[in-house]
Amino acid sequence: GIQVEQSPPDLILQEGANSTLRCNFSDSVNNLQWFHQNPWGQLINLFYIPSGTKQNGRLSATTVATERYSLLYISSSQTTDSGVYFCAVEVSGGSQGNLIFGKGTKLSVKP
Amino acid sequence: ETGVTQTPRHLVMGMTNKKSLKCEQHLGHNAMYWYKQSAKKPLELMFVYSLEERVENNSVPSRFSPECPNSSHLFLHLHTLQPEDSALYLCASRLVTGTEAFFGQGTRLTVV
């Protein structure tokens, strides 16, 4: 099956710093989403981005489908950005809507 | 608020109990999913329902029994669970031919 690898696994930042999270996947995908899991377990949708670039406030994401990777940028990080960031992909031609998740990047933003 | 609501948020049950988890969405989606998140493991897909029919069962033990009575509701019936079944159970929904999946808040299950 498809492999989804996220890096780094852990990241500690000082408030105000910028960061880049990476998601590599091993097969063609027709759906890629970035989620933020808050301390209570809720998965918050950040981006639906099977290709191209999107921006939402301090967050932006870029997916280069032909090279099978996606990047999530966090600028001017805040303590509320702490949590686990997941990348999830849906394989092209695969089972209906099955999102395959990476292991996540755990981000800690210190004040 | 994502539009997907799970109840209860927390559940403690004994190994001989029977309980049910509930998921509800009013987003007009046609597909619903159960995922399991154990400590230090990636989210694992358990069941998929598309247009109220089960289309995937990811080798889940029979002590977990899903039910999808209509496109807005999804249940996970639990019986004779094991302590290793303790985990966060997440429900998601999306359009069958659509794009984004949306998740509920999860049910944190502890089996004692």
Image (cartoon, coloured by chain):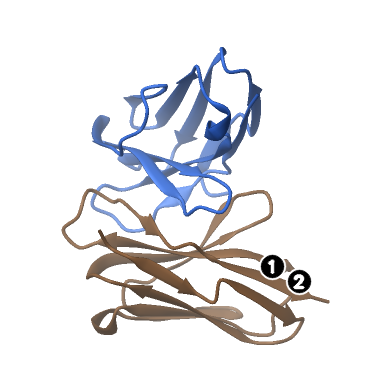
Chain colours: A brown, B blue
The chain holding disc 1 is: A
Residue type, numbered disc 2: Thr
SS of the residue under disc 1: loop
Closer to the camera, A44 or B66?
A: B66
Is residue B9 toward the left or the right of residue B63 in the image? right
Of all chains, the one bearing label 2 is: A
Against A51, is A93 above or below?
above
Q: For mark 2, give the secondary structure.
A: helix
Q: Considering depth in this image, is B95 or B90 the residue closer to the camera?
A: B90
**Horizontally, is A2 left or right of A105 in the view?**
left
Instruction: From the image, tell me which residue sits under label 2.
Output: A79
Left or right: residue A28 versus residue B59 is: left
**Residue at screen point 57% across, 18% down:** B15
Residue A82's disc is 1
Q: Where residue A20 sits in the image (x, y, percent)?
A: 54, 83
Quadrant of the image containing the C terminus of chain B: top right
Discs 1, 2 touching: Cβ within 8 Å? yes
Residue at point 73%, 67% (across, down)? A80
Residue B111: name its quadrant. Answer: top right
**x, y percent for residue B17:** 57, 13
